[in-house]
Amino acid sequence: MQKGLLIIYTGNGKGKTTAALGLVLRARGHGMRVCVVQFIKGKWQYGEIEGLSLLGELVELHIFGKGFTWLSKDMEKDKEAARYAFDFAKEAVCSGKYDMVVMDEFTYLINYKIIDEKDAVEFLVNRPKDVHVVITGRGASNALIEIADLVTQMQDIKHPYTIGIKAQKGIEF
Ligand code: ATP
Ligand code: MG
């Protein structure tokens, strides 16, 4: 590997997490070791959890947190869980055990000021040079975009949800 890339999938359109999973699939095909860290519990569904487990031990999935939404009854606890998840992800990136680390829905930690943007940027910039990091989530901040090597914004043009078509297996979960 020549250079670990910082890759961001952001925007309001559907496809951010699934794009990250596409990279996981591709990397796994090369025998690369992948760690997927899920920052919002509940977003991950049976389909992707089972699907990743089929990829074997080269691909790990760690689901953290309770969601840290403003609807939560115990915001402090949720924030703590999210910070713990960030610590876990940092360790994974620095461990030398993985070629790729996915930080799914990570943008929200910065957007809701659960972690300090400066800390996140400093960590990502100074991470080991050979690890690919893939971040997903709406509203990636300017600072994240600036330090990234690859940024794709999913644009919401049409979604079946808006005409009342419910979430379907294999597409949403
Ligand atoms: P996916 O996991 O399908 O790649 P995503 O990661 O881009 O989607 P998230 O913001 O994480 O999107 O939201 C996950 C859920 O919300 C999915 O079930 C997805 O279909 C749905 N969703 C994403 N974008 C839209 C949209 N523009 N309108 C309605 N629902 C959406
Ligand atoms: Mg997502």
Image (cartoon, helix red, strand yellow):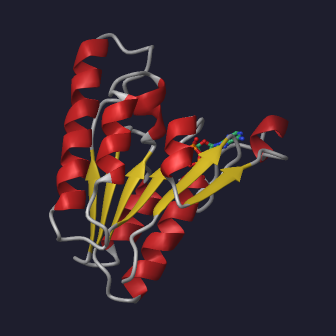
Ligand 1 quarter of the rendering: top right
Screen quadrant of the N terminus: bottom left
Choose between 153 and 42: the one closer to the eye.
Answer: 153
Q: Nearer the viewer, residue 130 or 99?
A: 130
Quadrant in the picture for residue 70: top left
Q: Quadrant of residue 65?
A: top left
From the viewer's side, name the closer residue of 53 and 113. Answer: 113
Whether residue 39 is visible = no
- Which percent across, then down, holds residue 48? 44, 61
The residue under the point 38% across, 51% down is: 103
Q: Residue furthest top?
A: 73
Instruction: Examine the image and state in which quarter residue 113 appears.
Output: top left
At horizontal 28% and vertical 23% (from top left) the residue drawn is 78
Residue 33 placement (x, y as % from top left): 28, 76
Question: Where 92 sits versus 157, above or below?
Answer: below
Q: Residue at x 69, y 43 (%)?
A: 166
Residue 148 screen position, x and y as percent: 51, 54
